[in-house]
Image: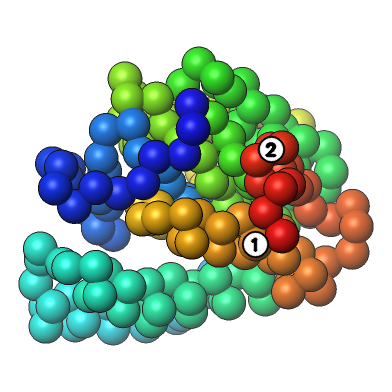
Amino acid sequence: MSPKFFNPWREIDRTHNHLPHWQQEGASYFVTWRLADSLPKERLDQHYHEREQWIRSHPEPWDESTEKAYHQVFSTRMDAWLDEGHGSCVLRTPAHAKVVAGALHHFESERVALISFVVMPNHVHVLFTLNADWKLEEMIHSWKRHSASEINRHRGETGPLWMKDYFDRLIRDPAHLNNCVRYIRNNPTKARLPVGKYCLYESPFAQSIL
C-alpha cells in the first residue's frame, strides 16, 4: 500500500471519545498513544479543561486551518509533556519496547503498511497507511491489547498499561507526510534519549526522506 492522503471531497467518519477522531477509508495516519501513568493528573485536568473550552468556541465541522490550529495548541503541548519522561516509562526497557515493535509489525502488509514508528519511554508514535477493510480504532485496539498483555506478563503486573484514548491525524499531503517522518526520526534526539532507550523503525520509503 502506498501513502494515501486526505481527500476533502470524500466522506469523513468523525468519532469522539475524549478526543475527536477523523477517518477516511484506506487513509494514512499519524497516531500517538501513551502509557496510563505518563502524565500527572493536574496537567491532564488542565489540558482537557482548556481543550473543551476551545472546542466549544470552534464547533465542528472544522476546516483544515481550524484543525491545524487545534493541533498546534493541544497536540504540540501534549508531545512536549510526554517528552519530559513522566511516569514509570516502562518502554525504556528494551524488551518492552521490542514487544510494542513486534505488535506493530505483526499485521504488516495485511492490515497496514508501516511507514515509520518510534517507541519512546512513555509513548508511541506510528505513521502508517491503513487497509480499507479495517477501522482505525480496531487496529489501534489490537496493537494496544496485545502489547499490554505481553508487557504486563513480563512485569508480573495487572491492570491498564495504556491510556484509553489516542491522538490521530489524517495525513493531508506529501509535505505533511514528510514532516511526520522527520518528527518521528528526531523525537529521541529532541527528548535527549541515548541509544538503547527507544526503538525507531523506518521503512525504505521513510529512509528516503531527508
The residue type indicated by label 2 comes to: Ser
Q: Earlier in the sequence, mark 2 or mark 1?
A: 1
The residue type indicated by label 1 comes to: Arg
Residue 27 falls left or right of residue 85: left
Residue that carries the numbered disc 2 in the rendered image: 203
Q: Residue at x 22, y 75 (%)?
A: 66
Q: Residue at x 55, y 19 (%)?
A: 109
Q: Residue at x 32, y 73 (%)?
A: 68
Q: Badge 2, how many Cα within 10 Å: few under 14, some, many 20+?
A: few
Element type where label 1 sits in the image: helix
Is 80 above or below relative to 117? Answer: below
Residue that carries the numbered disc 1 in the rendered image: 182
Residue 187 in the image: x percent, y percent? 69, 65
**Closest to the observer: 102 or 69?**
69
Judge whether residue 75 can be spotted in this image.
yes
Residue 117 in the image: x percent, y percent? 64, 46
Residue 3 in the image: x percent, y percent? 46, 39
Judge whether residue 49 can be spotted in this image.
no
**Closest to the observer: 128 or 172?**
172
Q: Residue at x 28, y 59 (%)?
A: 19
Element type where label 2 sits in the image: loop
